[in-house]
Image (cartoon, rainbow, N blue to C red):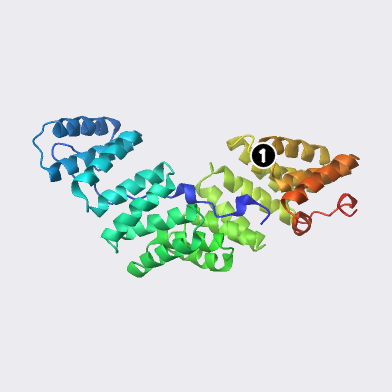
Amino acid sequence: MLKSRLLSATLSFFVFQSAFAAPPEYIDCVVSDHPSAKSLNDTISSCTAAIGSQKLSDSELAKAKAARAAAYKSTGHYDQALQDYKDAIDLTKVDPDLFFETGNLYAAIRDLDHALLAYDRAIELKPSFAEALTNRCYIHNLKMESDAAISDCEKVIKLDPGVTQALNGLAIAYQDKNQCSVALIYYSNVLNEDGKNVNSLMGRASCYDALDERKAAIEDYTKVIFLDPQRASAWNNRCWARAIVGDLEEALNDCNQSLELRPNDPETLDSRGLVYLKLRNPPAAIQDYDTALKLNSRMPASLYGRGLAKFETGQKAAADQDIAAARKIEPHISEQFARLGVAVSSADER
């Protein structure tokens, strides 16, 4: 696929769920349903006092450690939270919720291998632990382990067919296996339940893009922008899709909006370079491609597009150099550009 922007987005937006619908009260450590910074700090202080009292049984001490860990995590003190979860696990050994929460913490700091180990233990202790299976599915997706992700999310669906996070996890896994026709079914199932799920809308749109169904992709990107106008990637992706179908002025407006939200993003600069190329404005295209390649020198689309633009301005030797560099990274770049509706000039015919 030509664009990394069309790979399954949405993973970074996944919320790793808590095992507890409402945080419990532990000893004198009160964790409220809607904690404020003050109440979280009060929880840490109260738990610290309880832990230091030397009056708690092992079971009570584990609960106090877990409560303080949750408060530490919520305030961004991840090292302290991790230590408290480890201490609580040492005291209880077989509490699946503690392993689950430890996995969530590792996931939050993107320590994927340790997150997997923690989820593995939680599921070993509680095989029907749907939240842990769902989160492990997403970790496997982050690690591009699509078959393992599918296995976990399918288990969740068997437990509860209405878990939209699991349906979305299946969609991402099939998309990463380049099976977008299957992924579309799962994305659409999620959206039938929750039409405002922007992550599934983004995923479905990128699948439509991959299948060259640009009109449908643009419709979904438009829905995302309506629901979340600050999401720069949606503006960029719609710019890209519009550029391909020839709605060039609209595409240019989308790319400009994306760059206002996320200045100097190389993917968006690459998209706008394509727009300028199709608008037959090679100097502007070269400027955007130059900036994109300074930020990421291994973008074959930017190298190839710049080569075409340089040829149009008479820089034949430089054009040949860029096109050769692009082909070294992506041997099929010429065919990909032809599918984008870019006329391949004589720069690439020699």
Q: Is residue 113 left or right of residue 295?
A: left
**Is any part of residue 35 visible from this angle?**
no
Q: Is residue 5 left or right of residue 65?
A: right
Secondary structure at badge 1 equals loop
Q: Position of residue 297 (x, y in %)?
A: 70, 39
Q: Nearer the viewer, residue 41 or 108?
A: 108
Residue at x 55%, y 55% (from the top left corner) = 8
**Badge 1: residue crowd in 10 Å (few <14, some 14–19, many ≥20):** some
| Residue occupied by mark 1 | 296
Q: Is residue 350 left or right of residue 248?
A: right
Residue at x 32%, y 37% (from the top left corner) = 74
Q: Is residue 265 left or right of residue 82?
A: right
Q: Position of residue 118 (x, y in %)?
A: 34, 51
Residue at x 58%, y 54% (from the top left corner) = 7
Quadrant assignment, res 316: top right
Quadrant assignment, res 110: top left
Q: Nearer the viewer, residue 49 or 41?
A: 49
- Name the quarter where the N terminus is drawn: bottom right
Q: Amino acid at mark 1?
A: Asn
Q: Position of residue 199 (x, y in %)?
A: 49, 53
Outermost residue toward the left in this view: 55
Residue at x 73%, y 38% (from the top left corner) = 288
